[in-house]
Image: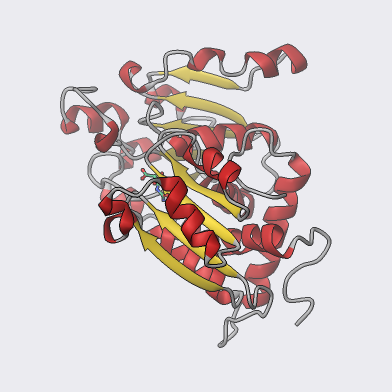
Amino acid sequence: MRHLLTTAGLPRKTVTALLDTAEALKQSLLGREVRKLPTLRGRTVVTLFYESSTRTRASFEIAGKWMSADVVNISAGGSAVAKGESLRDTALTLTAMGADCVVLRHPASGAAHRLAGWVPAHVINAGDGTHQHPTQALLDAATLRERLGDLNGRTVTIIGDVLHSRVARSNIELLITLGARIRLVAPPTLLPRDVAHWGNALASTSGDWPVTVSHDLDAALPGSDAVMMLRVQTERMHGEFFPSAREYAISYGLTEARLGLLPEHAVVLHPGPMLRGMEIAYSVADSPRAAITEQVRNGVHVRMAVLYHLLAGRDDQTPGEEV
Ligand code: NCD
């Protein structure tokens, strides 16, 4: 694997290898006082963020540091980007200084793909517009696997602003690869127009399209093994997509009462940042059925696994074995 740009077309074997590596890393670091592996010593990772981030950026930085890479963080706001420098020139500048890997977050869909064609470094897509966020989907899958085991045949209900969500797109592709079935639940205004056709290619090969679409959350919850809440992406909205936050919460918020409609074993996920009281009730976000902090914790191990597979290029070994 040279870059990680999308979950579309990522072979099941690769996904399983990444998740297994992340799990092995988690186990090997558990209870260690000194969390430092020598695996990426001498390698330089640059995080280049044109959009705000807490989790993704910090976890890439921690992941790199725990594997002894040198990590440099660049925010568009505080860099020459603010003086008008292009993405290409910024990235070429960083690779000229020796960046082995560029982790890019950018508001334009497709930005990471463009970057991968310009620079000699490995590129990781840390979110491009409304398009893809592959490491988020991987950490979601790692969290679901921990709680539910094999995801084959499991039903995951994705709720909220599907239209603007790169998290939803990456998850749909990855969960289908892992054999899960997906229910998308959203107001009609927050569903992509062609969503019902996304699976046509799949359906024609397997005779089965594992995604259903509805606007009725209460009907979708029973029988769901997991629910994945999405943030309402107001920064990508031009115009009104629903009447008010209160009405959104009434129809699509995960309330205590709705938690009761889910099977006992069902897991609640949210990629963060959460809008408590609107997308998810305070008590639901803090309930033991929510795996939101586990998602964040697994994010570090999953990003370590991705950096390892890209930079150390060993698919047959687990980092730590060489220690
Ligand atoms: C997501 C993102 O930025 O795409 N957050 C994240 O990476 N944890 C989801 C969001 O911002 O809504």
Note whether 240 is above or below 228 in the view shown: above
Can residue 292 be seen here? The reply is no
Quarter containing the C terminus: bottom right
How was this image coloured? secondary structure
Note whether 315 is above or below 114 in the view shown: below
Q: Position of residue 263 (x, y in %)?
A: 51, 38
Identify the residue at image location x=73%, y=76%. Answer: 320
- In the picture, measured across the screen, residue 232 lies left or right of residue 11, that is left
Identify the residue at image location x=72%, y=65%. Answer: 312
Note whether 307 is above or below 88 in the view shown: below
- In this view, which residue lies farthest toward the bottom? 33
Q: Position of residue 274 (x, y in %)?
A: 31, 48
Can residue 75 be seen here? The reply is yes
The image shows a total of numbered marks equal to 0
Q: Position of residue 136 (x, y in %)?
A: 51, 48
Note whether 287 is above or below 109 in the view shown: below
Identify the residue at image location x=53%, y=19%. Answer: 212
Q: Position of residue 55 (x, y in %)?
A: 41, 59
Identify the residue at image location x=69%, y=54%. Answer: 18
- In this view, which residue lies farthest toward the right? 316
- In the picture, measured across the screen, residue 120 lies left or right of residue 56, that is right
- In the picture, measured across the screen, residue 256 lies left or right of residue 148, that is left
The residue nearer to you, when weighing 149 against 142, is 142
